[in-house]
Image (cartoon, helix red, strand yellow):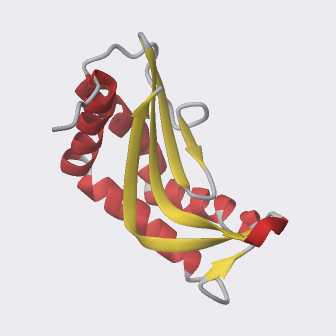
């Protein structure tokens, strides 16, 4: 049996709420990522500008961007911890990145950080080059730091 810290258990509960209560939103996030990747000439791109701005526009146009703060608030509620302020669809609460969407909320004793991963960053050797590739579905990673 492994010991699960209270923070890890809270983060797992946040993931469960996102999966169970925001399944449709996660589907839309995935559809937006698919639409972005469909415009690429191959299965990956090296230019961040071909990922982040079009992904953010797609999320905004689909209505997902404006729904993400509610999902974050529900995830925070699931942790049983207080949120310092109501989230909005902008940094630092909702940030569109080359990997997906990062949701952040300050808690009374830490910060909940959730990654809705829709892309992966593939490192090409030791030269620092990388490329972005669409992944299947939307993976959810959460931690309290």
User: Furthest residue to the left?
Assistant: 1
Q: Position of residue 76 (x, y in %)?
A: 33, 27
Q: Position of residue 13 (x, y in %)?
A: 23, 35
Q: Residue at x 42, y 11 (%)?
A: 109
Q: Residue at x 43, y 53 (%)?
A: 63
Q: Position of residue 87 (x, y in %)?
A: 46, 27
Front residue of 115/24: it is 115
Q: Residue at x 57, y 77 (%)?
A: 37
Residue 35 vs 54, above or below: the answer is below
Residue 97 vs 105, above or below: the answer is below
Give the total number of marks visible in the rendering: 0
Q: Is residue 129 visible?
A: no
Residue 57 vs 75, above or below: the answer is below
Q: Is residue 115 visible?
A: yes
Residue 104 vs 82, above or below: the answer is below
User: Furthest residue to the bottom?
Assistant: 41
Where residue 3 sits, quadrant-wise, is top left
Q: Quadrant of the N terminus?
A: top left
Where residue 83 sits, quadrant-wise, is top left
Seen in the image, is 48 located left or right of residue 39? Answer: right
Front residue of 48/67: it is 48
Q: Residue at x 65, y 66 (%)?
A: 51
User: Furthest residue to the top?
Assistant: 108
């Amino acid at each position: 049996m492994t010991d699960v810290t209270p923070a890890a258990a809270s983060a797992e509960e946040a993931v469960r709420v996102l999966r169970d209560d925001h399944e449709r939103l996660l589907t839309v996030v995935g559809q937006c990522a698919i639409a972005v990747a469909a415009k690429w000439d191959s299965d990956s791109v090296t230019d961040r500008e071909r990922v982040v701005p079009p992904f953010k526009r797609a999320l905004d146009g689909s209505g997902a961007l404006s729904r993400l703060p509610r999902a974050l608030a529900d995830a925070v509620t699931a942790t049983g911890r207080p949120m310092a302020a109501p989230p909005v669809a902008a940094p630092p609460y909702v940030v569109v990145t080359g990997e997906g969407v990062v949701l952040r909320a300050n808690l009374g004793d830490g910060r909940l950080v959730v990654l809705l991963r829709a892309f992966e960053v593939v490192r090409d050797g030791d030269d620092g080059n990388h490329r972005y590739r669409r992944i299947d579905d939307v993976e959810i990673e959460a931690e309290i730091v």
